[in-house]
Image: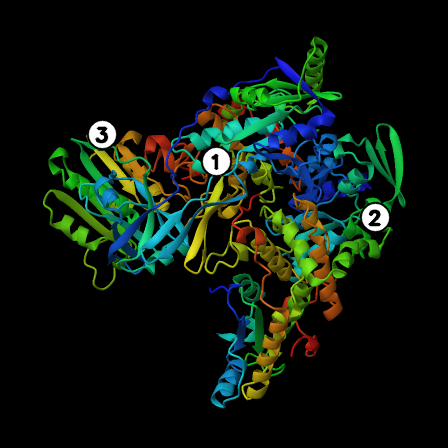
């Protein structure tokens, strides 16, 4: 699979069909990968496909000028579609190298399962529905659903729906939608006050690094509302009130664009369970309007469209 | 911005209304001139269309200490700009659901359609929303107990 | 001369110190490790602690702090500074983070003294804890720092199996030790054991960078736009690497107003943010590569020019926490040698 | 195994809180252009009024409590001690709030910070002042300073330009300098209007026409970055050495005292090491950072 990707990428650059290839290269730490953005066909040999290709590379599309060949998992391809819907990316400007993805391994979860840090783990391997973690020469097996990312467990498009070249066979996914929204279910079960207390506690940690925004392909505004000074919607000092307000408004802004790729939660250095917010928003949008982000490149973006009759029961 | 203090003997909710100038704002006017009684708890900001009501308005109002927010615009099909209220409707719907999920009492954010001639409806809506706010009590969402006690918040 | 204490007595020791100081120790908050006010009993951090996510600089330069409050009265504006903080004792600081504080001291003492940061520094004790299990992202040894030795702390603890060996580093530490009960003398054998442990830990830091002539190489590459653009390509312009860097100190100042009262706050800021240098008409660091260059050069070129020390301690946080694995050690490796520049 | 020792660099000294502003009161507001107002203010505290001193080229931080702080150069001359002046262009949150203030309003002031123009170096020399737009503000402090000690300096040329006649700041000063026989004043606008009878053209172009001699001269330049970038080459052509060209730079600043980090050009902090620089000091960075 990897070889095919490398060959295709090399060919695209050689034939001048693209100016850039965006893909994944091995990371500098164990069980990591890093985005590779290159014009050099020699770099194509560094491209990898493995269960750690976590980044949603479509975030780079809005800033790169030129034609791009981009490696995209199912969720990433939906982000690209969403960007096409928003006129941020021209379909003909990208060549999508679709990579079927049977789910990504959440290293934090693996760490917790074996009680060791990432660099103390010898190996993590996947065999179908089982994931084996080796520590100190001892191999322990876990059901894949316990080690994959939450967002992967409810993935509806493990094989990209939008692509130009598909690398490999369509993927099967060990889904567990219930497990995927377990945190949301927990929150929904709490009384209102307790929920608010929960988020208050979480956003007390927020340091306003804005990684959630920067990593999000749907956050493509040239200037974010949080940086406006007149009026100043959100106070720049990182106190929980404004941190939370920033995040609520951000998620309202990406409603209908968020494809549940889970990047915001992964990027967060202080472990705020952001996906419990974004995924919930996705559910709200689907429940009320039967709209799913990034599934139809011809569709009007969610917040700029309407039906004559919808959601009337929420308004007096 | 004024702040409610616990010391005040009788607490009255503060409701901030964003009213479309073509309908609800005129409706509020009509309610006044035709002497329809509605609670004085509402402070009104006139907006050109309910489609102008950014969710940030709601958040900022709650952050500033308003107990509730009301957005009111033209009935579907009656927008002065043809479609503004349709867009507003989607935003209102997702905002309402989302705020509730976060733990904000649904009474704190309400929306209504109310035409220029519906003075009675407007008065009813405001009365009803105010009643709801009285039931849920003062907005303490963004108040930090630690800061109230003068402790230093730190990283 | 050194002392020792059994690991199981660490709780007692911290309680004893807690009578005189507000004790901070590593704690996990929702899985995130940071220096938190010690709860009076939990010493489980001894089992899991490697380093915190939020660096201990937060104890001295918090992510936000009130600089002063103001009130508009009949007589005009009245300003009031916050009262001084309690004496703090930070237990378990790693040598890299302790060095980082010494590096920050230089900026905050330079030209004008920063009363908030220095006030906290003066009022604090640092108890170092040798790092016997460094992470794969650590490269402290390349920057003249040992994972187990430090002259930037007041006392230094070294893990010798069931006990900690305690060394005095400063007079402040000596004083503290003299007034601390429940410590035992060490034997020759234990001192040797500690020495071995230190050497072993030192050799476990395997990631290295070549700091030789790094400032010169960076200066020579300063205008090499191609190089910087390539380096910056995958950077997301978030603030993780800077805000959570123990030697990054940049801050923002903002006012908050409620009625006629308000306060001025300072909070962490990052050179990675586009608006950081934005002026009304223009922005000298509008492009991403400008900002990435600023971060790298500030640490490895400008800080050494001003203070004769590299403003990086090799703690590895920026590598571990980066969402796209942007690795500063790789960048430094790839800075073109000065020679090439001369050719061009 | 080696551990470097940097403890010798530690020292603690007690000092007053440098971040605490002094209260100043606005005494007069002068409307310069539609967007620029000059605020004439003084300390509320009588003792500070007496004791406060500064030098031409230094700056201060003005606070509007509840809105924030911004950096302004002091536009008045230290030779005129009974007040301070700052010219404020309305461009952002703080400056907008400043423009809403009236006479009698209180602000906060921290300063003076930064270095100043090298008067010793300038003495006995021919001076060429080159300014654009609101960039005249810091030079104005210096020009009045020089004119109040006129006999210490030789020839004085002032070249000042703005986008349009309406954008010319300190019109009353321009008039005074026009009348002053000891000063050669060249005022220009990028584009005149129907009432404008003066010179038209960009500042660097006018400078080329005026062509002041570089001999025993110092050029002091301040204006928008684009003007500065085009002015230096002209001066070089006229024979000015980098040491003879002096400018004062503007960067985004917050603390004003070299701590908050944002105003650096290379290892130089504009607030702490500047804002006044000779071209020799900054020419390495001029392409990308100035």
**Going 53% across and 78% down the picture, which residue do you hit?**
B20
Numbered disc total: 3
Between residues B148 and A133, which one lies in front from this camera angle? Answer: B148
Circle 2 is placed at which residue position?
A: A102
**Going 72% across and 65% down the picture, which residue do you hit?**
A284
User: What is the x, y in percent for residue A2?
Assistant: 80, 40
Between residues D65 and A216, which one lies in front from this camera angle? Answer: D65
Circle 3 is placed at which residue position?
A: D121
Q: Is residue C203 above or below residue B54?
A: above
On screen, residue B83 versus residue C110, left or right, reads right
User: What is the x, y in percent for residue C143?
Assistant: 58, 23
Question: Disc 1 is attached to a residue of which chain?
Answer: C
Q: Are marks 3 and 1 in contact (CB under 8 Å)?
A: no
**Going 24% across and 43% down the picture, which residue do you hit?**
D47
Q: Are marks 1 and 2 in contact (CB under 8 Å)?
A: no
Secondary structure under the numbered disc 3 in the rendered image? helix
Question: Disc 3 is attached to a residue of which chain?
Answer: D
Q: Residues within 10 Å of mark 2 (few under 14, many from 20)?
A: many
């Amino acid at each position: 699979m990897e070889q095919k990707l490398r060959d295709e990428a090399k060919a695209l650059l050689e034939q001048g069909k693209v100016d850039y290839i965006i893909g994944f290269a091995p990371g500098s730490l164990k069980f990591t990968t890093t985005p590779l953005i290159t014009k050099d066909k020699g770099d194509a040999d560094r491209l990898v496909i493995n269960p750690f290709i976590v980044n949603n590379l479509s975030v780079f599309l809005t800033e790169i000028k030129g034609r791009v060949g981009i490696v995209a998992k199912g969720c990433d391809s939906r982000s690209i579609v969403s960007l096409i819907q928003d006129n941020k990316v021209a379909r003909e400007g990208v060549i999508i190298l679709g990579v079927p993805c049977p789910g990504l391994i959440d290293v934090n979860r693996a760490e917790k399962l074996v009680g060791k840090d990432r660099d103390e783990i010898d190996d993590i391997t996947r065999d179908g529905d089982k994931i084996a973690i080796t520590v100190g020469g001892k191999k322990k097996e876990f059901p894949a659903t316990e080690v994959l990312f939450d967002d992967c467990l409810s993935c509806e498009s493990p094989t990209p729906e939008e692509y130009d070249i598909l690398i490999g066979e369509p993927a099967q996914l060990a889904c567990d939608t219930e497990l995927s929204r377990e945190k949301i279910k927990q929150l929904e079960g709490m009384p209102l006050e307790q929920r608010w207390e929960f988020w208050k506690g979480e956003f007390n940690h927020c340091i306003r690094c804005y990684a959630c925004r920067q990593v999000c392909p749907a956050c493509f505004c040239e200037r974010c509302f949080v940086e406006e000074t007149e009026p100043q919607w959100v106070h720049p000092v990182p106190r929980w009130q404004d941190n939370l307000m920033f995040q609520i408004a951000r998620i309202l802004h990406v409603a209908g664009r968020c494809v549940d790729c889970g990047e915001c939660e992964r990027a967060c250095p202080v472990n705020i369970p952001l996906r419990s917010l974004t995924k919930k928003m996705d559910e709200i949008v689907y429940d009320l309007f039967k709209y799913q982000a990034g599934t139809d490149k011809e569709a009007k973006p969610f917040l700029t469209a309407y039906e004559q009759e919808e959601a009337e029961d929420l308004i007096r | 911005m004024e702040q409610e203090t616990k010391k005040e003997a009788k607490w009255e909710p503060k409701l901030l209304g964003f009213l479309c100038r073509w309908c609800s704002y005129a409706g509020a006017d009509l309610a006044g001139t035709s002497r329809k009684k509605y609670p004085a708890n509402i402070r009104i900001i006139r907006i050109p269309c309910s489609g102008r009501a950014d969710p940030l308005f709601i958040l900022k109002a709650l952050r500033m200490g308003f107990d509730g927010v009301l957005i009111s615009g033209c009935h579907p099909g009656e927008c002065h700009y043809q479609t503004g209220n349709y867009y507003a409707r989607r935003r209102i719907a997702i905002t309402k659901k989302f705020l509730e999920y976060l733990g904000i009492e649904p009474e704190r954010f309400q929306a209504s359609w109310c035409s220029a001639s519906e003075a009675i409806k407007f008065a009813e809506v405001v009365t009803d929303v105010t009643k709801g706010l009285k039931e849920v009590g003062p907005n303490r969402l963004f108040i930090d107990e630690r800061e109230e006690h003068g402790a230093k918040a730190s990283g | 001369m050194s002392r020792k204490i059994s690991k199981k007595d660490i709780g007692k020791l911290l309680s004893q110190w807690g009578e005189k100081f507000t004790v901070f120790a590593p704690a996990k908050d929702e899985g995130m490790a940071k220096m938190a006010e010690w709860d009076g009993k939990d010493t489980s951090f001894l089992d899991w602690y490697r380093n915190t996510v939020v660096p201990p600089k937060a104890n001295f330069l918090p992510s936000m702090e009130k600089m002063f409050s103001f009130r508009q009265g009949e007589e005009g504006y009245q300003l009031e500074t916050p009262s001084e903080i309690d004496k703090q004792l930070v237990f378990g600081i790693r040598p890299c983070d302790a060095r980082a504080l010494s590096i920050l001291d230089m900026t905050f003492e330079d030209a004008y003294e920063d009363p908030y940061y220095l006030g906290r520094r003066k009022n604090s004790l640092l108890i170092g804890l040798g790092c016997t299990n460094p992470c794969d992202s650590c490269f402290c040894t390349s920057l003249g720092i040992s994972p187990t030795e430090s002259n930037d702390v007041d006392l230094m603890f070294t893990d010798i199996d069931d006990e900690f060996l305690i060394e005095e580093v400063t007079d402040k530490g000596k004083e503290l030790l003299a007034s601390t009960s429940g410590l035992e003398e060490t034997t020759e054998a234990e001192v040797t054991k500690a020495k071995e442990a230190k050497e072993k830990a030192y050799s476990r830091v395997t990631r290295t960078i070549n700091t030789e002539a790094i400032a010169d190489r960076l200066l020579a590459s300063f205008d090499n736009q191609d190089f910087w653009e390539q380096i910056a390509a995958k950077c997301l312009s978030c603030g993780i690497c800077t805000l959570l860097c123990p030697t990054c100190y940049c801050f923002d100042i903002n006012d908050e107003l409620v009625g006629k009262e308000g306060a001025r706050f300072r909070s962490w800021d990052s050179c990675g943010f586009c608006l950081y240098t934005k002026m009304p008409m223009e922005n000298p660091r509008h492009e991403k590569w400008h900002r990435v260059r600023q971060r790298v050069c500030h640490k490895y070129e400008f800080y050494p020019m001003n203070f004769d020390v590299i403003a990086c301690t090799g703690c590895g946080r920026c590598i571990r926490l980066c969402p796209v694995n942007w690795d500063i050690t790789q960048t430094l490796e790839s800075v073109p040698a000065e020679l090439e520049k001369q050719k061009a | 195994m080696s551990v470097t020792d940097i403890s010798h660099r530690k020292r603690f000294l007690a000092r007053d809180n440098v971040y605490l502003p002094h209260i100043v009161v606005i005494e007069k507001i002068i409307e310069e252009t539609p967007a620029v107002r000059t605020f004439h203010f003084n300390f509320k505290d009588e003792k500070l009024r007496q004791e406060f001193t500064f030098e031409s080229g230094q700056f201060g931080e003005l606070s509007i409590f509840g809105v924030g702080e911004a950096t302004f150069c002091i536009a008045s001359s230290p030779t005129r001690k009974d007040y301070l002046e700052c010219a404020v262009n309305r461009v952002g949150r703080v400056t907008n709030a400043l423009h809403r203030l009236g006479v009698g309003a209180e602000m906060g002031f921290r300063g003076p910070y930064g270095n100043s123009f090298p008067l010793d170096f300038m003495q006995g020399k021919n001076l060429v002042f080159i300014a654009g737009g609101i960039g005249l503000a810091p030079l104005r402090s210096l020009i009045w300073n020089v004119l109040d000690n006129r006999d210490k300096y030789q020839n004085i040329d002032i070249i000042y330009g703005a986008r349009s006649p309406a954008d010319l700041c300190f019109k009353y000063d321009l008039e005074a300098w026009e009348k002053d026989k000891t000063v050669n004043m060249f005022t220009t606008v990028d584009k005149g209007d129907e009432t404008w009878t003066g010179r038209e053209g960009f500042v660097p172009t006018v400078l080329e026409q005026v062509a002041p001699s570089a001999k025993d001269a110092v050029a002091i330049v301040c204006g928008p970055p684009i003007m500065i970038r085009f002015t230096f080459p002209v001066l070089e052509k006229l024979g000015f050495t980098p040491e003879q060209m002096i400018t004062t730079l503007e960067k985004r600043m917050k603390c004003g005292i070299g701590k908050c980090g944002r105003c650096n050009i290379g290892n130089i902090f504009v607030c702490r090491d500047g804002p006044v620089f000779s071209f020799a000091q900054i020419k390495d960075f001029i392409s990308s950072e100035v």
